Amino acid sequence: MSKVSYYTEEGLAKLKEELKQMESVERPKISAQIAEARDKGDLSENAEYDAAKEAQGLLEGKIANLKEIISNARIVDESQLDNSKALILSKVKIKNTANNATMTYTLVSAKEADLKTGKISVESPIGKGLLGKVVGDVAEVQVPNGKIKFEILEISR
């Protein structure tokens, strides 16, 4: 049984574009490399052929994995989400109670996570700690250095 993952429309579109790139550009490129290596003669001692076949196997594995992810992907309808709790696609403003630093994160699926743009995975320790919390709650998050407490200041979309 495969795991259902939730994505934004934008996130799912990126996955589909990545799959299209692999199937329409990378796959033909590797097939051409295999054909070129095959034309060079004896396959039993042809390192180029072995490398191209290995690259093909890795690519096919990636394609199969991505197809499975896409088939189990569900788009989150943002209009149906509850703004009173931190859920996937929530923008959560938090304060570290130890140093009073404030941060704002958007909770997203693992594939869409990008810390530079403030998107953290709901599967990360902080993301898990924030899920289901409401404004005013304090989330205690286990990180490698110990536990950090974050106060939920604001939740929006």
Image (tube, helix red, strand yellow):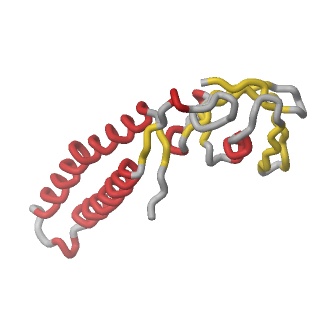
Query: Does the rendering let one see residue 115?
Result: no
Please report the residue visible at 13 percent of the width from the left and 64 percent of the height from the top. Answer: 38
Q: Is residue 43 left or right of residue 124?
A: left
Please report the residue visible at 9 percent of the width from the left and 61 percent of the height from the top. Answer: 39
Looking at the image, residue 55 lies above or below residue 143? below
Of residues 35 and 2, which is closer to you in this image? 2
Please report the residue visible at 28 percent of the width from the left and 46 percent of the height from the top. Answer: 22
Q: Is residue 60 left or right of residue 10?
A: left
Please report the residue visible at 64 percent of the width from the left and 28 percent of the height from the top. Answer: 83
Q: Give the x, y percent position of residue 113.
A: 55, 38
Q: Is residue 127 left or right of residue 39?
A: right
Q: Give the x, y percent position of residue 111.
A: 50, 43
Of residues 33 and 83, which is closer to you in this image? 83
Looking at the image, residue 130 lies above or below residue 94? below
Q: Is residue 45 left or right of residue 97?
A: left
Q: Residue furthest right?
A: 98
Q: Give the x, y percent position of residue 52.
A: 25, 59
Q: Quadrant of the N terminus?
A: bottom left
Query: Does the rendering let one see residue 8?
Result: yes
Q: Give the x, y percent position of residue 14.
A: 38, 36
Q: Quadrant of the C terminus?
A: top right
Looking at the image, residue 84 lies above or below residue 132? above
